[in-house]
Image (cartoon, rainbow, N blue to C red):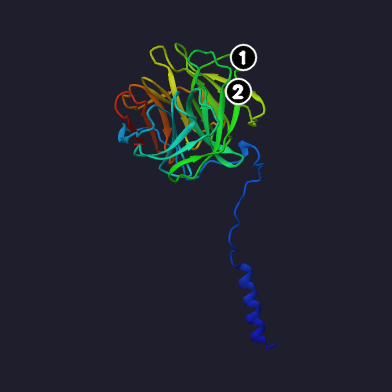
Amino acid sequence: MHDDRVKHLVLLLLLLACTPKPAATLVPDVDASTPDASATVDAGVSCDCQQWGNPRNRGLVADPLVELSGLVASRAQPGVFYAHNDSGDSARFFAMATTGAIAQTFTLDAATATDWEDIALGPCPTGTCVYLGDIGDNLRLRSDYAIYRVPEPTVTSGTTSVPWERFRYEYPQGGRHNSEAIFMHPSTGRLYLVTKEDSAPSEVYRFPLPFDSGKVAVLERVATLTVPGSTDRPLTGADVNGCGTAVLLRMYNRMVELRLPAEETDFEKLFTVDPVTVPTASEGQGEAVAYGSDGQSYFTASEKLVDPPPLYEHRCR
């Protein structure tokens, strides 16, 4: 082979060796069979808001959401909320747009809806699931508290039957509590329940992992909050942001946000910080609250009293 051809061949091999290769897709080395290892926080969510704006009416909540109690935003389908009615409705929930319009109805065939009060979204073995809380107990007489889990659906239109699992639970020492608020940490898969007290601060309980439909789980008490205060009305709703760094707590008369300090890595330390009062519209029977999927907004709505209630948005200033 001539010297020039040898030189060209050597140069070509050097160029091929130095050419960058496409980066491999990084898959976390986790056991996806457990809820706390099946998802991570969406890197596109921004959760740094320190001051929220005043409410803006985005539209009227449409029928058949006549007694809206639970509300949560889809993170995979921006602009979609999942919502359900309070007690008295069948076992179903809805996909709702940011205008209040209903896009689709999802039915849990053969399930019961004794007193559904709140809804959450978070990781599960199949990816992301919707969690529905049959948690209400106004008279403190129930012995059949439960959480329903449904794989997050792809929203289209019409009415669709969805598969579900039911996870029964009880409180420590056989206690009975009324609750209207649940939320799930977006990466650990920890589900939290907040009690509704008539004249005392609310308590926070967590659901033990892993979820097991064959057992009755005993909740673990985490904290006693500083809200509601002596001049507040009871706590009726909650949600966690997509970064797992803040929680909104809704009462009939006001709303507060618990913010995890920047240097803190233990999420449950959030329950010990001083609550920050945030804006909320005047809503006669306000129970629903949800962060927007972008982390830069939150939404509230009231149960229908006379006219269709507005869906309010608060954006970061």
Q: Nearer the viewer, residue 97 or 247?
A: 97
Disc 1 marks a residue whose amino acid type is Gly
- Location of residue 295 (image quadrant): top left
- Location of residue 251 (image quadrant): top left
Do we see residue 193 in this rendering?
yes
- Location of residue 48 (image quadrant): top left
Task: State the SS at label 2.
Answer: strand
Q: Residue placed farthest to the right in the image?
A: 1
Task: State the SS at label 1.
Answer: helix
Disc number for residue 174: 1
Residue ID at (48%, 37%):
106
Q: Nearer the viewer, residue 56 or 223?
A: 56
Is 192 placed above or below 153 here?
above
Q: As drawn, is 211 to the left or to the right of 225?
A: right
x and y percentages locating residue 52 in the rendered image: 36, 32
Between disc 2 and disc 1, whose residue precedes? 2
Q: Nearer the viewer, residue 239 or 133?
A: 133
Residue wearing tag 2 = 169
Residue ID at (66%, 43%):
30
Disc 2 marks a residue whose amino acid type is Tyr
x and y percentages locating residue 55 in the rendered image: 31, 32
Disc 1 crowd, CA 10 A, few/some/many (<14, 14-19, 20+): few
Disc number for residue 34: none
x and y percentages locating residue 148 in the rendered image: 55, 31
Figure disc tally: 2
x and y percentages locating residue 249 in the rendered image: 44, 25
Q: As drawn, is 215 to the left or to the right of 45?
A: right
